[in-house]
Image (cartoon, grey):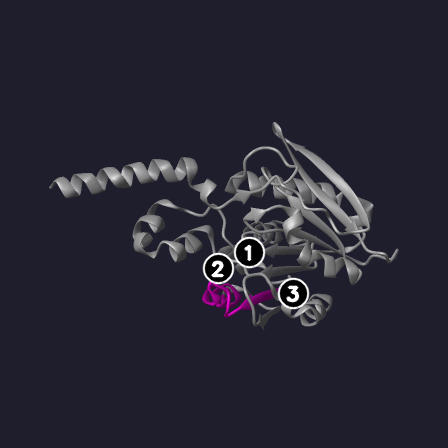
Amino acid sequence: MKTSVFFSLFLILFSIFSKAQMDDKFYQPSKEMKTLEFTNIENLSLPVENDTITAVILKPESKSIKKTIIFFHGAAGNISTYQYITKPLVENGFQVVMVDLRGYGKSTGKPTHLNVASDGQKMFDYLMARQDVKNTKIYLYGASLGSQIATHLAKENQTKISGLIIDGGMLSFTDIAIHFSPQYKEVIEKFLVSPYSAKEDVKALSNVPKLFIYSKGDSTVPFSQGELIYANAPEPKQFLEFSGEHIQAMVVDKSRILTAIEKL
């Protein structure tokens, strides 16, 4: 009887805790910025509520820009942490926008699932009002945790984009939590509800070309999650497997990745 009461109390406390704080477990922002290794950098700053989100537009040497990639990075670090992915894109003629949502890099505030989605849309709307972006083909790129916001934005703006790239993305916040804490699967499924998820949002993208990049050697996001999100996605779609660690495809298989993105 005591055990039953204790477990019931635990579930109640977990429910309260999850609704108030569990978003914190998914985001590990850093304020420490590495030097950005690009020639043409434009800094952006966008007010959101009482905070500010920042981004950089990285322009290639070519004056004739045909494609823009809006890049959403993973859970840790900030835009400077992920320039190893975007630098080859810029060098190959893509215009790239790297976004730091609340709490990351020079952005203020604290990230939550809901304000990340809201701020991502506001940044997208701002970019679409710019002629140097609007007059190009737009691609959304989500690396790791960035897969959730990228896929969600793709669903909400699919008539405005030309493609979606998912690099080592998980199925949902809930699924990745279960992966790391399988012993609490039932509790997590009951109380940690994803407000949006790539595995569901991707189902709506029947007219958007999609590229999925995964490795069987990934020790962070299971390869099986990549297979499942790919299975949920309607055509047109492509699954690109590489050999390496989490979101390292641009390092170990750069030529093939760039070719696939170019053809998307």
User: Which percent across, then down, holds residue 120?
Assistant: 62, 43
Q: Is residue 50 above or below residue 1?
A: above
User: Judging from the image, what secondary structure is the residue with disc 3 in?
Assistant: helix
User: Judging from the image, what secondary structure is the residue with disc 2 in?
Assistant: loop
Magenta stretch bounds: 211-231
User: Which percent across, then down, holds residue 166?
Assistant: 59, 60
Q: Is residue 17 magenta?
A: no
Left or right of 134, for residue 121: left
Numbered circle sitting on residue 144: 1
- Label 3 CA crowd tier, 10 Å (few <14, some 14–19, many 20+): some
Give the residue at mark 2: 220
Q: Farthest right residue?
A: 63
User: Which percent across, then down, holds residue 109?
Assistant: 58, 33
Q: In the figure, residue 167 lies in which quadrant?
A: bottom right
| Kind of residue indicated by mark 3 | Val
User: Judging from the image, what secondary structure is the residue with disc 1 in?
Assistant: loop
**Callout 3 touching callout 2 (CB < 8 Å):** no
Question: Residue drawn 68% across and 46% down?
Answer: 34
Q: In the figure, residue 42 lies in which quadrant?
A: top right
- Label 2 CA crowd tier, 10 Å (few <14, some 14–19, many 20+): some
- Please state which of the two labelled residues, at mark 2 or mark 1, is closer to the viewer: 2
What is the CA distance from the residue labelled 3 to the residue labelled 2? 17 Å
* Quadrant showing the C terminus: bottom right
